[in-house]
Every structure is written in structure tokens, then in C-alpha cells.
């Protein structure tokens, strides 16, 4: 009886390991291509995230970020962001450095804070009085990036390249305000700047 149970247990374990391996292979696409750290840029005073290369030519990327604003910077806030951008131009600076001078993009950020909701409260404002969401912001972005290849001696770190980037962005609320007040607002008033590092695996 014990031998029979042992054989059955072995078969179940073998099937489980085989299924787990297949399942893990199917989920391989969830492993990010890059880790991201960013300062400012409308998604938090500091933010961290994971990035994925998209399109067959790998000239696009999809990022997921978590951002935090500490209390001493105007009130504690938490935000999540989904970014999509494209890198149409590539300039080779050397064998170990590339420049992506103009990367247009779009992202959505959602801020978690007790005074912010997806919609304005109907008890305070008539329906449609404000068109925008207090917590959800769509943004247009324009970034540039210098990509540096890592020396072979650093292979143990698991990082192949480092990207240093700056990103300018604006949102729907800023754009509408600018168009309604062009005499008193300049483009520099409606664009925010973020600076970040992209560690590519």
C-alpha cells in the first residue's frame, strides 16, 4: 500500500511540476524588460516602476509606475500611472551609447487621496458642471533618452543598459486653461518636467 501511495504521489508531483513549468513559461511575458526610477514629472515626487518593450522593433514601451508625494511637499499623495511612448528616432553616438532625441507619448495617472475622487460629488455640483476627473489625469508627454550599454564586466548585475531620460508632460486641464488664458499663461506654465533612470535587463 505504501509503495502504491508513493507511486501515485510521485506521478502527481511529476504532473504538477510539468504543469507549473508550462504555466511559468506562459507567464514569462510578465517579467519586465526594465526597472524605472523617476523624480517629479506629474506622477509623484518620486516614483518607481516596471517597463516593457513593445512592437516588433522594440521602439515602443509600456510602463507601470507607482508614485509618492510626501507630506512636506504639499500633502501626502499616492499615484499609479500607465505610460505608452514611441521612440521613432535613434542616433548612434558610439558603440556603447545611443540617443533617442524625441519620444512622443501618452499616459494616464490616478491619484489616491481622500479629497480626490474619480468624479465630482453630485451633491455639491450639478452633473456635467466640471468635465474633468479630480483624480484621473490624461497626459501628453515628450521625452528624450541617452542609452548606455553596460560593460561586460558588470554582467553579474543582470543589467544590460542604462537609460537616462528627461520627460516633459502636460494634461487636459492645463491645456484647456492655456487656450483660455493665452495672454497670461505661457507654454512653460503648463509643462512639467520629470527626470528618470531606466535600468534595462
Image (cartoon, grey):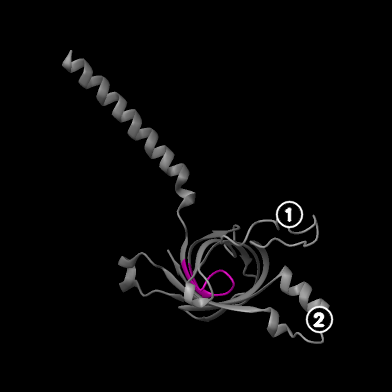
Whether residue 81 is visible here, answered yes or no, is no
In the rendered structure, the answer to whether residue 193 lies left or right of residue 123 reads left
Q: Residue at x 29, y 24 (%)?
A: 11
Q: Residue at x 42, y 38 (%)?
A: 22
Q: How many marks?
A: 2
Tag 2 or tag 1, which sits nearer the N-term? 1
In the rendered structure, the answer to whether residue 154 lies left or right of residue 74 reads left
58 or 133, which lies in front? 133
Mark number for residue 166?
Answer: none
- For residue 60, above or below residue 170: above
- For residue 136, above or below residue 185: above
Residue located beneath label 2 in the image: 181
- Is the residue marked by circle 2 packed among few (<14), some (14-19), or many (20+) residues within 10 Å? few
Q: Residue at x 57, y 60 (%)?
A: 114
In magenta, the rendered stretch is 36-47
> Could you say which quadrant of the image residue 184 lies in?
bottom right
Task: Find out whether residue 28 is within the magenta segment.
Answer: no
> Could you say which quadrant of the image residue 15 lies in?
top left
85 or 124, which lies in front? 124
Q: Position of residue 200 (x, y in %)?
A: 45, 66
66 or 152, which lies in front? 66
> Mark 1 or mark 2, which is nearer to you?
1
Q: Quadrant of the C terminus?
A: bottom left
In the rendered structure, the answer to whether residue 147 lies left or right of residue 100 reads left
Q: Tell me the distance, in whole angstroms, between the alpha carbons under discs 1 and 2.
A: 30 Å
Dot 1: element: loop
Q: Position of residue 151 (x, y in %)?
A: 36, 75
Residue located beneath label 1 in the image: 123
Task: Find out whether residue 42 is within the magenta segment.
Answer: yes
Whether residue 28 is visible here, answered yes or no, is yes
- For residue 85, above or below residue 143: above
Q: Quadrant of the N terminus?
A: top left
Amino acid at each position: 500500500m505504501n509503495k502504491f501511495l508513493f507511486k501515485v504521489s510521485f506521478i502527481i508531483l511529476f504532473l504538477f511540476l510539468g504543469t507549473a513549468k508550462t504555466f511559468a513559461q506562459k507567464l514569462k511575458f510578465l517579467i519586465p524588460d526594465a526597472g524605472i526610477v523617476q523624480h517629479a514629472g506629474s506622477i509623484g515626487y518620486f516614483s518607481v516602476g516596471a517597463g516593457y518593450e513593445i512592437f516588433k522593433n522594440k521602439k515602443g514601451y509600456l510602463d507601470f509606475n507607482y508614485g509618492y508625494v510626501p507630506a512636506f511637499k504639499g500633502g501626502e499623495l499616492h499615484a499609479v500611472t500607465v505610460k505608452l511612448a514611441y521612440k521613432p528616432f535613434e542616433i548612434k553616438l558610439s558603440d556603447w551609447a545611443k540617443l533617442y532625441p524625441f519620444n512622443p507619448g501618452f499616459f494616464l495617472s490616478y491619484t489616491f487621496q481622500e479629497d480626490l475622487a474619480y468624479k465630482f460629488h453630485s451633491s455639491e455640483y450639478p452633473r456635467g458642471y466640471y468635465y474633468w476627473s479630480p483624480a484621473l489625469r490624461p497626459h501628453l508627454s515628450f521625452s528624450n533618452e541617452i542609452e548606455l550599454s553596460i560593460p561586460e564586466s558588470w554582467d553579474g548585475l543582470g543589467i544590460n543598459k542604462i537609460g537616462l531620460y528627461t520627460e516633459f508632460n502636460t494634461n487636459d486641464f492645463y491645456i484647456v486653461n492655456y487656450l483660455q488664458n493665452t495672454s497670461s499663461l505661457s507654454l512653460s506654465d503648463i509643462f512639467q518636467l520629470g527626470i528618470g533612470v531606466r535600468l534595462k535587463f
